[in-house]
Amino acid sequence: METLTPEPGKSSPPLDHHHHSKHDGAALKDSTEAEVTKISLMRALVESRDPSSKEVDDLMIRRFLRARDLDVDKASTMFLKYLKWKHSFVPNCSVSPSEISDDLAQEKMYVQGVDKKGRPITVAFAAKHFQNKNGLDAFKRYVVFALEKLCSRMPAGEEKFLAIADIKGWGYANSDLRGYLGALTILQDYHPERLGKLFIVHAPYMFMKVWKLIYPFIDDNTKKKIVFVETKKLKSTLLEEIDESQLPEIYGGQLALVPIQDS
């Protein structure tokens, strides 16, 4: 992997030199000293390679650093790859519902409430997902749309969401390995450090065969956040993270689910 270094004549900006006020206070307040230094180093480096990096706040830089254990070179490579992907795959900066009408019509993702840490909660129903007849890119756009919606619901200072993947009723007709891996790539490579926790509920035996194929592609940071929930302990497990007033009705809580496009 090439080592990234700023162009000659460009030195790292001093630590108090920041381009944005958007979130910097929050980023620097919760950051370790090492992170503050590395945010600054990484910013100088990526801005020398891609000037559009200037638009990005320190919280985003920090998420990429954390995803690569504060290795500035690796995080910068990952971040520049993300920018390139975003410019080509999401040229209008966001995905419009008209581009993904088939996926939205399946009503397979819902959002409502927040967990005890203030993270927005999303529920995805695997049995409502079928391989997209418009091809893999349409489904990937749907995933981008859903992640944008979730991020827009995060309160100030919160960067993560909690997800419940409900596999009830899933069968081979729903099995879309390329779609699942595409979604995983978008989450891990382009929205790092966004997933706070993933509860997998009602997973049938058949699904575990597909899970074994996906598991090797999940990075170690993400693996730590995934919990398979026993059906008989479903409500009690979810209540550890989510107050009853914020828990979906279908799991014994008090909130009705809202389709993600209406959230």
Image (cartoon, grey):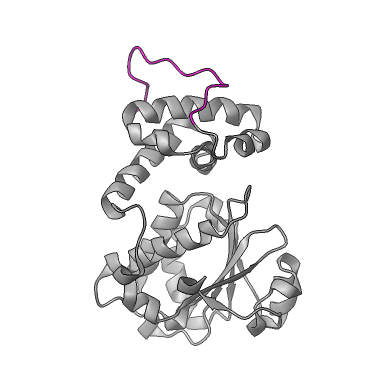
Residue 136 as seen in the image, left or right of residue 117: left
- Residue 22, above or below 258: above
Residue 206 percent across, percent down from the top left: 47, 82
Residue 3 percent across, percent down from the top left: 36, 27
Residue 11 inside the magenta-drawn segment = yes
Kindly identify the residue that appears in the image at 62 percent across and 81 percent down.
256
Residue 92 percent across, percent down from the top left: 30, 54
Residue 229 as seen in the image, left or right of residue 98: right
Quadrant assignment, res 9 = top left
Q: Which span is picked out in magenta?
A: 3-19
Kindly identify the residue that appears in the image at 56 percent across and 21 percent down.
15
In this view, which residue lies farthest toward the bottom?
169
In this view, which residue lies farthest toward the top?
9
Kindly identify the residue that appears in the image at 42 percent across and 30 percent down.
73
Q: Nearer the viewer, residue 206 or 221?
A: 221
Residue 31 inside the magenta-drawn segment = no
Q: Nearer the viewer, residue 148 or 252?
A: 148
Q: Nearer the viewer, residue 25 or 218?
A: 25
